[in-house]
Amino acid sequence: MLPPPDPRFAAQSSWLEIDAQALAQNARVLRDVLGAGVRLGGVLKGNAYGHGFAQVLPLAHAACDILYVIDPRDALEVRGFEAKGGVPRRQVLVLGAVEADEAVALARAGVDLALTDSGQERFVPALRAAGVRLRGHVHIDTGLGREGFTPGELASGLGFLAAARDVIEVAGVLSHFANTEDVTEQSYALSQLAAFDEGTRRLREALGGAGELERHIAASAAALLLPHARYDAVRAGIALYGLWPSNETRLSMRALTGRVPELKPVLAWRCQSQLTKWLPKGSYVGYGCTFRCPVDTRIAVLPLGYFDGYPRLLSSRAHVLVEGQRCPVLGRVMMNHVVVDVTRAQGQGALVATLLGRDGDEQVPADQLAAWAQTINYEIVTRIGAHLRRIVV
Ligand SMILES: *Cc1c(COP(=O)(O)O)cnc(C)c1O
């Protein structure tokens, strides 16, 4: 645990610690599972799953073969980082929505783009006018019902790509699973794999002499659980950050392989108390007077709240860790304040509370916060405010 942060920033004294070694270890664990010949891609969308794009970029760049982003500006930031640091370029692929001028910028920067629908035909004149060639990966919607060409749309999609060969090079083909993390039997994933293979076959046929296509469909869960979904590359998000896609994924992993690889959470979220004080028995705490102290109670007021991404659903449910001990959240989580019971804490000055992560022998995992807040660990970490300080440790 870090010492409390610089008191000049006391008003925002909640901070995130990003464990560089944990991320490197998770990448090694994933490579181990994948074996040789499968490229490891890291997904940096959602502010690097809330861990901080700027802080994670150097770590993921070193640990992964490919970087996947949603926002084209993030891809350009990767190129800027490489140019500034004099590090070799990684393959970068934009999975998300882009405008024609952004497609031109990506082509110039040597960034790949997912080709998801016929509406992208509008990129063609812009690319021609700019005199650049874009590397695209055809996204086939094999059953998620999100972006990508459905099998029925593929013929018309391939038509526009065949006519745009001068400015769009089809370098890969991808898809995305719908429910690999929700189930322990993977029949739907198998139907998606069959559709992916069929779509890839039609794509190859339509493009004739095109070079090798990079095939990728697996996110974390499928990368771990489905060996024949690994193809040429996997797109690992949540697992790279040391979190399991779901409990089902962890259970399936044990059932299928007899062992559960050790992923190490990369993130800890801590803060320094704004003040501590004693409230006499019978006092109320927080909006709605939902908590009343049954005995004299020492409280700590923590300077963070739902504005910072600490869910209001954690009201009266969660605990934080102080001096390695569980301290319950009292009453409602407020916009900028959380009140916790620190009666058992020894420290007299400002206390350091761990909202997420480990402190001594205790920990508050993202999965635990997710269960309390009726959501998934993905949402817990990605919603942690982008305004908070992130420190790589
Ligand atoms: C988010 C996402 C991933 C990564 O998913 P994880 O479950 O976090 O590994 C991979 N591919 C696509 C298309 C995604 O949207």
Image (cartoon, rainbow, N blue to C red):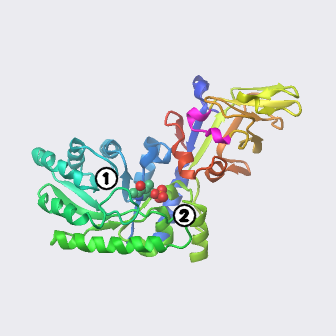
Q: Amino acid at mark 2?
A: Asp
Judged left or right of residue 26, residue 118 is left
Q: Between residue 126 and residue 349, name the one nearer to us.
A: 126
Residue at horizontal 30%, vertical 74%? 198
**Residue on which the image places disc 1:** 88
Instruction: Determine which quarter of the picture holds residue 6.
Output: top right
Residue 236, labelled with which disc?
Answer: none
Judged left or right of residue 295, residue 7 is left
Q: Which residues are magenta?
A: 305-314
Q: Nearer the viewer, mark 1 or mark 2?
A: 2
Residue at horizontal 50%, vertical 57%? 240
Q: Position of residue 82 (x, y in %)?
A: 32, 46
> In this view of the protein, can residue 3 be seen by the observer?
no
| Main SS category, magenta section | helix
> In this view of the protein, can residue 179 be seen by the observer?
yes
Q: Position of residue 61 (x, y in %)?
A: 40, 52
Q: Between residue 292 and residue 57, name the one nearer to us.
A: 292
Judged left or right of residue 108, residue 39 is right
Instruction: Determine which quarter of the picture holds residue 291.
Output: top right
**Residue on which the image places disc 2:** 182
Q: Between residue 174 and residue 156, name the one nearer to us.
A: 156
Q: Residues within 10 Å of mark 1 (few under 14, many from 20)?
A: few
Q: CA distance from mark 1 to mark 2?
A: 38 Å
